[in-house]
Image: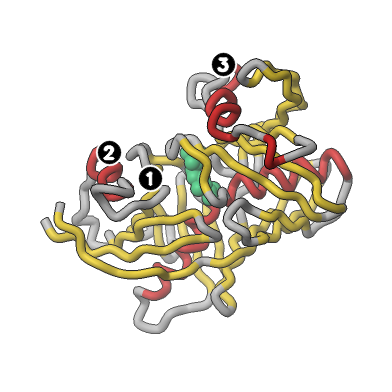
Amino acid sequence: MQLKFTKMNGAGNDFVMLDNRDRSLSLDPSRIAHLCDRHRGIGADGVLMVEPSLHGADFLMRYYNADGGEAEMCGNGARCFARFATSLQAKPSEEVSFETLAGLIRAQITDGLVTIAMSDPHSHRPPETLDVAGEEMEVHFLNTGVPHAVAFVSDLEAVDVRKAGAALRYHQAFAPKGTNANFVQTIEPGLIAIRTYERGVEDETLACGTGVCAAALLYHLKSQTPSPISVKVRGGDTLQVGFEKVAGNFRKVTLTGPADFVFAGTITL
Ligand SMILES: N[C@H](CCC[C@H](N)C(=O)O)C(=O)O
């Protein structure tokens, strides 16, 4: 089987993009994982498929992690999806909407930067002290389309993200589905830095969009710093998170950042 694909990345979080508007593709988890394999496949943190909308949006977005499992949402992936899906249109639009398992996402494309309006965050938990790989950490939690545990630290470079990230990702407190694990350091008021161990990639990624949103919103709760909040990711980019508070709840959360085409090709499966 010859499969056409496009490779993109959003702030270093990289993806295989597939056009499945005819719904002819049916890839099992092992094939998805093969596409993401950095030695035997194309190499990526995940796979995004463009499918026809089911409820009146422009498209439907399916997201799969590198381990082949489907996830509800992907923030960096959604920005890449917006640019890729509109590139398939006869007259590419600058605004696009698409359904995800986490809800409807609207995107605005301007000069290579993409702003997505996220689904409303939920399931906020007050911080709790957890044993994370033998170290006591105060851990916050928020679901921004997918689950995120966030620990604020004084020195991001000193964190063993693979060890502490895996311990948090599989921690009993987040069983059975687990969570993404984020470590955040305040750089200056309104600017934080983040490192993320991603569920389903099972490693640190160069950026995690939904993690960036969770970190920014939880940082607001800690510091009362107003919107927008800038977040510097491991890959070197700085993403912007906007939000409003309505009756104490976060609403109109937006994520702005790059979404770049890298190459297109055909893989033999
Ligand atoms: N690994 C995440 C999904 C992708 C999130 C990340 N790539 C993003 O940009 O939001 C999970 O399984 O919950």
Kindly identify the amino acid type of the residue bearing the numbered disc 3: Gln
Name the residue at the left extreme.
1
Badge 3 crowding class, 10 Å Cα cut-off, few under 14, some 14 to 19, many 20 or more, is few
Quote the CA–CA distance across marks 3 and 1: 24 Å
- Under circle 3, the secondary element is helix
Name the residue at the bottom extreme.
91
Name the residue at the front extreme.
158
Q: Position of residue 16 (x, y in %)?
A: 35, 57
Kindly identify the amino acid type of the residue bearing the numbered disc 1: Tyr
Instruction: Report the residue at 71% width, 49% height from top.
Output: 193
In this picture, residue 265 sits left or right of residue 260: left
> Up-down: is 265 above or below 142?
below
Quadrant (top left, top right, bottom left, bottom right) of the N terminus? bottom left
Which mark is on residue 101? none
Specify whether residue 127 is in view: yes
> Up-down: is 42 above or below 108?
above
Beta carbon at label 3 within 8 Å of ligand 1: no
> Up-down: is 190 above or below 249?
below
Quote the CA–CA distance across marks 3 and 2: 25 Å
Instruction: Report the residue at 42% width, 73% height from top.
Output: 86
Instruction: Report the residue at 71% width, 33% height from top.
Output: 151
In this picture, residue 172 sits left or right of residue 128: left
Q: Position of residue 268 (x, y in %)?
A: 15, 56
- Under circle 2, the secondary element is helix
Looking at this view, is 257 or 254 the one in front? 257
Which mark is on residue 64? 1
Q: Which residue is mark 3?
A: 172
For the residues bearing labels 1 and 2, Cβ distance under 8 angstroms: yes
